Image (spheres, rainbow, N blue to C red):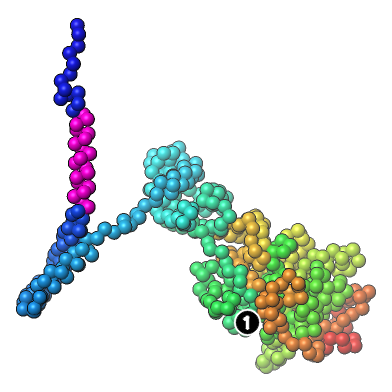
Amino acid sequence: MARRPLPRILSSGSASITRSREIARTAADSATDVLHPLITVVRGLRLLAVSGRQKWVATPKERRGPKLFLGAACVLVVALVPYGPILALITVMGAAAWKGRERTPVRTGPDESETARLRSLYEALVPYFSTADDPDPLFAHGGDWTNAFDAYAFDQDGRLTSLRISYPAYFTDGEAAARSRIEQLLHTKSGRGREYHFGWDEEANRLVMTVLDALPTTIAAQRFVAAPGETVLGFTDPDSVSRTVPVRDGDTTVDASPVVWRTGGRSTEPHLLAVGQPGGGTTTLVRSIALQALQNGDVIIVDGGGSGEYAALTGRNGVLAVESGLGGALATLEWAAHETERRLITANLARQSGRPAPDDIRRPLWILLDRPGVLGHLAAADGRPDPQELLRIPLRHGRATQVTVVLAEQFDALDTLTETVRTHTRARAVLGTAFPEQIEAVLGAGPHTTPPPEVPAGRGYVRLGAGPVLRLQVPATPDPYDDATSDAHRQAVLDLLPGRGEAMEAAPVPEPADEGPATAPVPVAAETAAVPVEAMVAEARPAEPLAKAQPAGAES
């Protein structure tokens, strides 16, 4: 049976409908373009009317009468003024056009790439923040990531700069290993090469990840605003400390957040240990401390590495000695130990007699040792005592006698540090590239940030006693005699160096290099026999007690 053809109206209807839709869409677009000013004005009039109604509703009833009278008076004045109605109409139309203009829509959520990144991060956290027994899991494969991520922010490259995560209450956030796994995962998924700060709020079950800005490396050595007994180790993040100091950063003056180390009789961490890799900046830190200590104290420097990094300080006023050889280092440290004993005995006698402490024991004395492990190895090979053994008295009694010890060592020689040094150096710093395990082993606590793979010299972490672990950037304090030093930094260090003059009165007495320090105890003078310092006298003492510090180069 032959099929009948469809009626013409049915066969060609779809094409006609399509053509009609295109004509209607074109006409609507044309009308929109022609009537766009009118649409804008009408939209503005509507918004003005809504705004006026809201203000009228918000006006108290007792104030509506005066406002209505004032409005009527304004209308009357406009009506009586020549060309007033026309000007009023133009003003209203202009205000409506401005109010009804098209604005760029405000971005209220992430775009597709950012949403994909957040979803990927959510899926990666599911194995750590979920269990099979949870009836209503916050983290589940294919779940809604908006419930877990409360707030987030991206940079111009589409990488996360901050993220706040809500995690289940059963997550073991009190265990360092569990937190470390989450931090490592977030660091990996959010992008390497940056430094992240992780703030754990165990009470609210929230974790805030923030990308930290790089600490400034352009701040050079200078006179910092600090009180006596305060030393600026470097600078940290603004939200980590509650204090700022004005510093010169190139040709400008800015406010920086310093890490202030307090020494003296009331300090809970009177001695410092700095550890780092070669080129990490430990020598720079020691040199910076020496320049600040010379403002109101005396300095003894022992350069165990023998690199000559402290040659610029030789012969300066306040620098009692700069030693790099084993014999000179032993003699200098032996004198420092006896000087600490003398100060302790003198202070005790002054307290017993009710007199203030003499001025000669109130002037701070700084003992700076760079790489003592090298000298210890040489001393062991020569059959002589380890120089660190001579630090027992300054480390134990230095706080009461204004004696401060600063040691700098490298990671590969940490096992050479004695137990006395480890116990009494409660201020710690780690500089240069280091693994989180190494940082925690030195500071006693891990940082709340992820160490970047590459850091500039003088960049690291610091912890004062039982305080928090802070990021640290040591001010640029290079050796001014180094050819690789820039002119600006060289001049900054030279401006801080004291002048050269005659040797000061409290310099150590040199001893022949072939004679080791005697360890035989010497009886205390009769006038000090009643002083209760038995534990102190039991320490190793030189063969001839120095009743008073003698000038450098004096005959023994």
**Which residue is painted at 53% across and 77% down in the image?**
254
Would residue 268 be seen by someone viewing this image from the given angle?
Answer: no
**Magenta residues, as a range?**
14-33
Foreground residue, 493 or 48? 48
Q: Position of residue 456 (x, y in %)?
A: 65, 64
Foreground residue, 556 or 325? 325
Helix, strand or loop at mark 1: loop
Up-down: is 428 above or below 552?
above
Crowdedness near tag 1: few (<14), some (14–19) or many (≥20) residues, C-alpha within 10 Å: some
Q: Position of residue 274 (x, y in %)?
A: 69, 67
Q: Is residue 145 left or right of residue 387?
A: left
Foreground residue, 136 or 232? 232
**Which residue is painted at 91% across and 75% down in the image?**
513
Q: Is residue 38 left or right of residue 298?
A: left
In the picture, the quarter occupied by the C terminus is bottom right
Would residue 514 be seen by someone viewing this image from the given angle?
Answer: yes
